[in-house]
Amino acid sequence: MLHKVRVTVLERMLNADLQRKYCADPESGKCPCCHEGDEFIFERCGDRDDFWHCGAGTLVRTDVKSGQSERMAGGFGGVTHAGSKGVPFCSEAWDAVSRYIYTALQGGSIMHGWMRDERVMIACCNDGTRPVIFRIERLDCRALYIEGIRCDGCRERVRKALMAVPGVTDVKFRPEFTEAYLDREVPDEALRQAAEGAGGYKVARID
């Protein structure tokens, strides 16, 4: 089983009274590093270790246009968009969410007994004047090494076959293997039969 983590920015909040009372810049405004809807994917696979790099390069979706983050940024001299290439999470956010990300990357329970789904946690950064609310989700997937996939048609047939297996929520293709994302335990044999049954394919192994 492989484990990834999806982090989504749910909300940027602003405690304007506290900023005016305590901050060096009383008009700092909301956090310029993250934006509602930002989505980050953390992996520790092969040479890639997003945890070690504090989330730099993990941003996979944003509604902010290129360069807008830099124009919005104030204070501390040019804050850039967290998770973009070469840009880690800010220290206040990383201090708050890194423990949950690390636990999820190891396949552990993020918050058993508190959340409805132990694979999910809602957390916020440490800045009390402009906190950012994050949803942290553990993503479980199996890596299928499938022989015989040669074209987009092959990928579509395999995708449909795997998506028909109860518990499979998404399928993504990498050069070396195919990822089947799961919301529950799914027997390897069910994944193998589905992939091979799509027509002329052989599953060499499943990780």
Image (cartoon, rainbow, N blue to C red):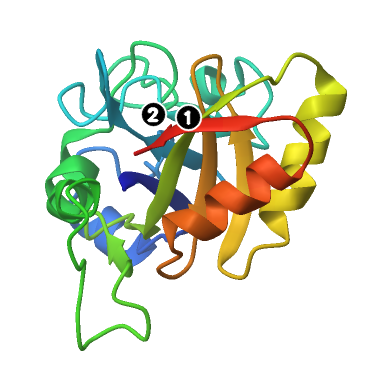
Disc 2/disc 1 C-alpha distance (Å): 8 Å
Residue 183 visible to an observer of this rendering:
yes
Q: Amino acid at mark 1?
A: Leu
Image position of 71 (left or right of 57):
right
Identify the residue at image location x=39%, y=43%: 31
Element type where label 1 sits in the image? strand
Residues packed near mark 1 inside 10 Å, few (<14), some (14 to 19) or many (20 plus): many
Question: Is residue 47 placed above or below 37 in the rendered structure?
Answer: above
Element type where label 2 sits in the image? loop
In this rendered view, identify the residue nearer to me: 126 or 99: 99
Image mark for residue 157: none
Q: Amino acid at mark 2?
A: Ala
Quadrant of residue 27 in the image?
A: top left
Image position of 103 (left or right of 121):
left
Whether residues under marks 2 and 1 lie with C-beta atoms below 8 angstroms apart, the answer is: yes
Question: Is residue 168 placed above or below 2 in the rendered structure?
Answer: below
Quadrant of residue 143 in the image?
A: top left
* The C terminus: image quadrant: top left
Question: Is residue 40 placed above or below 71 in the rendered structure?
Answer: below
Residue 133 in picture, x, y percent from top left: 38, 61
Quadrant of residue 196 in the image?
A: top right
Name the residue beneath numbered marker 1: 59
Identify the residue at image location x=22%, y=60%: 128
Name the residue beneath numbered marker 2: 82
Identify the residue at image location x=24%, y=33%: 90
Residue 176 in picture, x, y percent from top left: 49, 17
In this rendered view, identify the residue nearer to me: 115 or 63: 115
Identify the residue at image location x=55%, y=22%: 174
Residue 159 in picture, x, y percent from top left: 73, 42
